[in-house]
Image: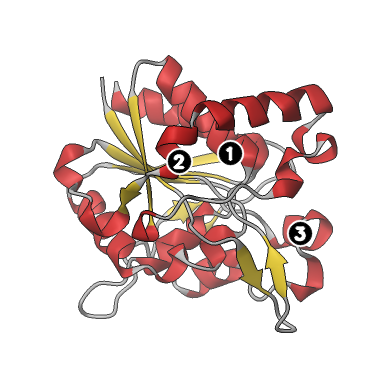
Amino acid sequence: MANILMVVSAADSLTMRDGTEHPTGYWAEELVVSHKTLLEAGHTVSIATPGGVKPTVDQVSLSGAAAGGQERADSFRDYIASLDAELSSPLVLADVDLADFDGIVIPGGHGPMQDLFKDKDLGKLLIAATKDDKIVAPFCHGPAALLSAIDDDGAFAFAGRRLTVFSNDEELGGGTGPNTPWFVQDELAAKGAVIENSTPWSSNVVRDGNLITGQNPQSSEDVAKEVIKALQ
């Protein structure tokens, strides 16, 4: 069975276009569903954050409205509680040895737009993973983390690669709206990524070689299943 590195944002707020701070973190459904699916398939999942900081769950993602019902929200809360020891002492991203892992999974929430998109340690891991043909699987806002993968020549490591990401329509219609500081879809496209988004709020997974991406929270389970398939 494989060893999976799950990289989670350490941010607890997002600086908005108007300079205000918007409470955020990781999205419960994305971490819980992907982690649980990978674990149930027999894989080992290790959580890492910048600085080894305990990640913050976006409280909105624990509401019944956001989770698809209160029962589902409660199950997310319970699963996160069961991971408390690991979440309280995650691996330090800068200390991670990629040789110990078979792939990298990056759930979203708006947190990655605050820290992971510019994290140089993560960028090095993503570039190395791609060179070694190891799975890189960010989803929803997680693909913002791909922006950290700038090589020594200033080139974007994922230019020309096919991927999906939380769409502008989803951001404007149900995300942080017009006050969003920047749009992940636009930034990735500007760097040369080929965006293949689908219907808002429906599962959409795109695989391009070692790169597996998902569009939104609804894609969480399908991303994990595609990772499992790729590891077989």
At horizontal 28% and vertical 64% (from top left) the residue drawn is 121
Find residue 150 and report its horizontal and vertical position in percent. Answer: 31, 72
Category of crowding for the residue at label 2, using alpha-carbon neighbours closer than 10 angstroms: few (below 14), some (14–19), many (at least 20): many
Residue 159 in view of the camera: yes
Sequence order check: which comes first, mark 1 or mark 2? 1
User: Is residue 11 or residue 7 the one in the foreground?
Assistant: 11
Q: SS for tag 1?
A: helix
Find residue 127 and report its horizontal and vertical position in percent. Answer: 25, 59
What residue occupies the far bottom of the structure in this picture? Answer: 18
Category of crowding for the residue at label 1, using alpha-carbon neighbours closer than 10 angstroms: few (below 14), some (14–19), many (at least 20): many
Q: SS for tag 3?
A: helix
Q: Is residue 67 above or below residue 75?
A: below
Q: Is residue 172 left or right of residue 99?
A: right
Q: Which residue is mark 3?
A: 169
Q: Which residue is mark 1?
A: 30
Which quadrant, please, contains the N terminus? top left
Q: Is residue 91 left or right of residue 217?
A: left
What kind of residue is marked 2?
A: Leu
Residue 193 in view of the camera: no
At horizontal 37% and vertical 67% (from top left) the residue drawn is 119
Sequence order check: which comes first, mark 1 or mark 3? 1
